[in-house]
C-alpha cells in the first residue's frame, strides 16, 4: 500500500487513493490534512494537463476520484472545509447556448485552485450576470459558449457590464470551441483561454494584478 | 444482366453509387442547361474526392438554418412549417449557387419530437429560443452497469432501455419482451411475447410512434421534393447518408462525456466490446441511406477524438480503430466516408494518415490546413476550415482572403473542397456569398 495520497491522485490510481483515504480516516488523521494532500495531487494533475501529458479524460477522471475522496472526508470535517482564498469568479454559459461540459471543467479547475466560483449555469440572461457581479463583487467573469450564436450573446453581455458601469473593475475571459482572437475583439472581452488550466492561469494573473 | 448488390465488388458498388449520383434515375431537369450544370457539379466533387484536379475547387458551405435566416424566418418556423422549410432552403441554393446542397434533413420535424416528448435535444420553441438552432442535452441515458445489456442485444436495449429515457411518450416500451422470443407458437412462445402489446402503456407508446410517424411522413415528402427540385435546377445533394463512430454514439448519446470518460478507466474492455458490437450497425446506417439516396458520400461528424479531448495513446486505443473499422465497412459497401473532425485534429494527422488511400474525404474545422495537406495530400481529399468565426464576425474581404489562403495551401494537385469549418447559421449573407464567389474566382485549375 502506497502511503502517498498526493501521488496516487496525481497518477489517477483511484482504488489506491480511496484506500489511503479510508486508512487515514480510520487512524483519525486530520481530515483537513487529507484534503490538502488531495489538493496537491490536483495541482500536479493541472500541471500535467498544462504540459500536455494529461488531457480532458484525465482531468475529468481526477475530478471523479476527488469527488469520492470528498464524500469520504466530509462527514469528519468539523469546519466547513478549505477556505476559498484565491478570489471570486463568475462563470456562465451565455444566453441562447445550453452547453455545459467545457464550462463545468473550468469551474472544477477554478474550484480546486481555491477560487470561490459562482456557477450561473447555462443560457444565462445578460442582466442576471450583471446583477451577479453587483451582488458578489467578483472582479473576474468567464463567459462560455460552444455555438456561433454565443458571439453575439457574449458581446451583448460585455456591453451590458459596461453600461452598468462595471467594466472598469471587471475582467472578462471567454472560452469555447469556436473562439478565436477575432471573436475576442468582436465581443470586447479581455482575452480568451483555450482550456480550463488556462482559465485558472488567467484568473490568477488578474487577481494578483489587482 | 445487372448484378445484385450483394454480388458486386466494393469497386462495382462504388461505381454504381457514383453513376446514380451523376445520373439520378428518373431525374427531371428544368432544361438542358440545368442538367449539364448538375453533372458538372457532381463531376467536380467526384474529381476532388478522387484526388484529381477538377475544373475548379468545388464549394459546399456547411449550411444549417442559414436559408431560414436569409428568408426572414426562424429555425422554429422551418421546423414546424414544411412549406417554409422548402422555400427558405431553396432560396439559399438557388441564389447562392453552391456546388452541392445539404438537403433539408438538418431541419428535423419539430412536431414529431413534440409528440414523443424528446429529451435528448432542446430545439426552437422547446428549450431554446425560436431564433436559435437545436442543441444536444447530454446526460447519462445509459447507466455504467448496462454495458452487458447493450452488448448482448443492442436493439432490445435501445427499444426497452434507452428510448423510454430519451422519449417520454415511449415509457411503455420498457414492458416489451425481446421480439426474438417470438420463435414459434409451440410452448406459448409467441403468445407470451405478444402479451406486452396488449398493455395500455405499450399501446400508448405505439400510438405516439404512429402519430410521430405521420408527421415524419409529411416532412420526408418535403425532403424528397427539395432534393428533386434542386436536382431539376442543377444542384446535387452532397451527402448520401450519415452515421457516427461508435465512441461518439456511446459518449454523446448514451453514457455522456463524463460517463464514457470514467468507463475508459474503470471498464475499458466493456466499452471497447460495446463499440465493436455497434460498428456493423453504424456501417449499415450509413450504407442504407447512401443506397437510398444514390450518392456515395457518408457524413461522420467526429466529436470526442479531437485535440485535447484525449491523449494520442487514448485516441489510438479508443477512437481510431473504431473509426477505421467504420470507414472500412463503408468502403466495402461502395461508400465514401466523410469523417468531419470538429475542433482541432492537429495532433491526430499522423495517425489518420493511415486512412484508406484515395477512398475517404477528411473534413476539418480548425485544423492547420497547410499541415493537413502536407500529411494527407497523397492519402485523400481534404475539405473544410473556412473559419466559422471569420464568416460570423469578419468582413467579406476577410473571407475572400481566407479563401485565397485555403486555395493556396490545399488546392494544389486537386483533392480539396471548400467548406466552412462549422455549420453556418445566422451568418452575414455577404460573407457566405464571398466564400462561394471567391472560390469560383480563385479556385480555377
Image (cartoon, rainbow, N blue to C red):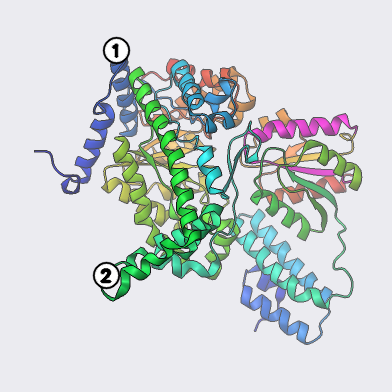
Circle on res. B31: 1
- Percent across and percent down for residue B377 are 38, 37
Residue A134 percent location from the top left of the image: 90, 42
Residue B233 lies, in percent from the top left, at 36, 18
Instruction: Please say if A170 is above or below A23.
Output: above
In the picture, measured across the screen, residue B280 lies left or right of residue B392, that is left
Identified at 39% across, 32% down, the residue is: B221
The residue where tag 2 is placed is: B185
Q: Give the SS element for disc 1.
A: loop
Q: Position of residue A18 (x, y in %)?
A: 68, 77
Indicate whether A56 appears above or below B18.
Answer: below
Q: Is residue A151 visible?
A: yes
Q: Check disc 2: other Cα within 10 Å, few if <14, some if 14-19, many if 20+.
A: few
**In the structure shown, which secondary structural element does the residue marked by tag 2 occupy?**
loop
Q: Quadrant of the C terminus of chain B?
A: top left
Is A127 above or below relative to A46? Answer: above
**How many dots with numbers?**
2
Verify whether residue B11 appears in magenta: no
**Rendered image quadrant of residue A109:** bottom right
Q: Chain of mark 2?
A: B
Judge whether B113 appears above or below B321 on screen.
above
Residue that extends furthest to the bottom in the rendered view of this protein: A27
Query: Mark 2 vs mark 1: which is more N-terminal?
Result: 1
Circle 1: is it few (<14), some (14-19), or many (20+) Cα within 10 Å?
A: few
Q: Residue at x 26, y 73 (%)?
A: B186
Please name the residue shown 81% across and 53% down the image.
A117
Magenta-highlighted residues: A138-165
Q: Residue at x 82, y 55 (%)?
A: A115
**Depth order, front residue of B384/B238:** B238
Amino acid at each position: 500500500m502506497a502511503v502517498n495520497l498526493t501521488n496516487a491522485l496525481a497518477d489517477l490510481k483511484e482504488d489506491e487513493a480511496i484506500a489511503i483515504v479510508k486508512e487515514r480516516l480510520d487512524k483519525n488523521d486530520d481530515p483537513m490534512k487529507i484534503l490538502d494532500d488531495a489538493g496537491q495531487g490536483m495541482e500536479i494533475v493541472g500541471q500535467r494537463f498544462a504540459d500536455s501529458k494529461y488531457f480532458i479524460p484525465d482531468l475529468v477522471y481526477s475530478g471523479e476520484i476527488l469527488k469520492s475522496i470528498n464524500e469520504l472526508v466530509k462527514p469528519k470535517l468539523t469546519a466547513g472545509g478549505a477556505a476559498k482564498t484565491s478570489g471570486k469568479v463568475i462563470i456562465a454559459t451565455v444566453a441562447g447556448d445550453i452547453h455545459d461540459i467545457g464550462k463545468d471543467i473550468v469551474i472544477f479547475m477554478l474550484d480546486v485552485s481555491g477560487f470561490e466560483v459562482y456557477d450561473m449555469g447555462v443560457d444565462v440572461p445578460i442582466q442576471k450576470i450583471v446583477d451577479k457581479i453587483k451582488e458578489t463583487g467578483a472582479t473576474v467573469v468567464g463567459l462560455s459558449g460552444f455555438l456561433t450564436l454565443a458571439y453575439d450573446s457574449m458581446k451583448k453581455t460585455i456591453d451590458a457590464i459596461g453600461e452598468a458601469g462595471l467594466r472598469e473593475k471587471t475582467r472578462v475571459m471567454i472560452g469555447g470551441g469556436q473562439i478565436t482572437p477575432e471573436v475576442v475583439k468582436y465581443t470586447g472581452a479581455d482575452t480568451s483561454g483555450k482550456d480550463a488550466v488556462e482559465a485558472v492561469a488567467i484568473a490568477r494573473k488578474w487577481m494578483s494584478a489587482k | 444482366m445487372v448484378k445484385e448488390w450483394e454480388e458486386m465488388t466494393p469497386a462495382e458498388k462504388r461505381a454504381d453509387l457514383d453513376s446514380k449520383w451523376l445520373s439520378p434515375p428518373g431525374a427531371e431537369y428544368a432544361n438542358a442547361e440545368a442538367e449539364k450544370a448538375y453533372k458538372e457539379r457532381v463531376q467536380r466533387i467526384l474529381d476532388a474526392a478522387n484526388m484529381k484536379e477538377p475544373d475548379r475547387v468545388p464549394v459546399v458551405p456547411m449550411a444549417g438554418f442559414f436559408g431560414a435566416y436569409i428568408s426572414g424566418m426562424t429555425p422554429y418556423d422551418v421546423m414546424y412549417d414544411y412549406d417554409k422549410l422548402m422555400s427558405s432552403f431553396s432560396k439559399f441554393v438557388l441564389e447562392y449557387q453552391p456546388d452541392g446542397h445539404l438537403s433539408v434533413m438538418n431541419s428535423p420535424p419539430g412536431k414529431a419530437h413534440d409528440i414523443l416528448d424528446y429529451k435528448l435535444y432542446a430545439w426552437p420553441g422547446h428549450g431554446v429560443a425560436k431564433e436559435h438552432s437545436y442543441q444536444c442535452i447530454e446526460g447519462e441515458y445509459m447507466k455504467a452497469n448496462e454495458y452487458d445489456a447493450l452488448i448482448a442485444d443492442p436493439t432490445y436495449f435501445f427499444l426497452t432501455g434507452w428510448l423510454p429515457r430519451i422519449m417520454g411518450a415511449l415509457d411503455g416500451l420498457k414492458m416489451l419482451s425481446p421480439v426474438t422470443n417470438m420463435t414459434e407458437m409451440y410452448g406459448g412462445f409467441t403468445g407470451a411475447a405478444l402479451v406486452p402489446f396488449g398493455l395500455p402503456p405499450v399501446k400508448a407508446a405505439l400510438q405516439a410512434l404512429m402519430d410521430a410517424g405521420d408527421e415524419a411522413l409529411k416532412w420526408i415528402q418535403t425532403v424528397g421534393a427539395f432534393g428533386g427540385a434542386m436536382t431539376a435546377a442543377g444542384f446535387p445533394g452532397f451527402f448520401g447518408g450519415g452515421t457516427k463512430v461508435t465512441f461518439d454514439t456511446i459518449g454523446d448519446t448514451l453514457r455522456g462525456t463524463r460517463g464514457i470518460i470514467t468507463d475508459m478507466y474503470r471498464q475499458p474492455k466493456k466499452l471497447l466490446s460495446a463499440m465493436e458490437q455497434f460498428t456493423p450497425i453504424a456501417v449499415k446506417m450509413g450504407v442504407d441511406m447512401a443506397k437510398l439516396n444514390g450518392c456515395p458520400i457518408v457524413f461522420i461528424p467526429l466529436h470526442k477524438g479531437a485535440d485535447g479531448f484525449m491523449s494520442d495513446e487514448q485516441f489510438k486505443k479508443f477512437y481510431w480503430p473504431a473509426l477505421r473499422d467504420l470507414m472500412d465497412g463503408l468502403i466495402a459497401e461502395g461508400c465514401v466516408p466523410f469523417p468531419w473532425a470538429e475542433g482541432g485534429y492537429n495532433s491526430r494527422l499522423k495517425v489518420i494518415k493511415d486512412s484508406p488511400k484515395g477512398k475517404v474525404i477528411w473534413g476539418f474545422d480548425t485544423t492547420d490546413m497547410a499541415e493537413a495537406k502536407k500529411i494527407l495530400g497523397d492519402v485523400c481529399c481534404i475539405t473544410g476550415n473556412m473559419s466559422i468565426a471569420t464568416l460570423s464576425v469578419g468582413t467579406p474581404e476577410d473571407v475572400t482572403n481566407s479563401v485565397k489562403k485555403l486555395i493556396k495551401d490545399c488546392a494544389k494537385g486537386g483533392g480539396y473542397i471548400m467548406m466552412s469549418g462549422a455549420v453556418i447559421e445566422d451568418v452575414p449573407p455577404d460573407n457566405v456569398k464571398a466564400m462561394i464567389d471567391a472560390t469560383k474566382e480563385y479556385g480555377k485549375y
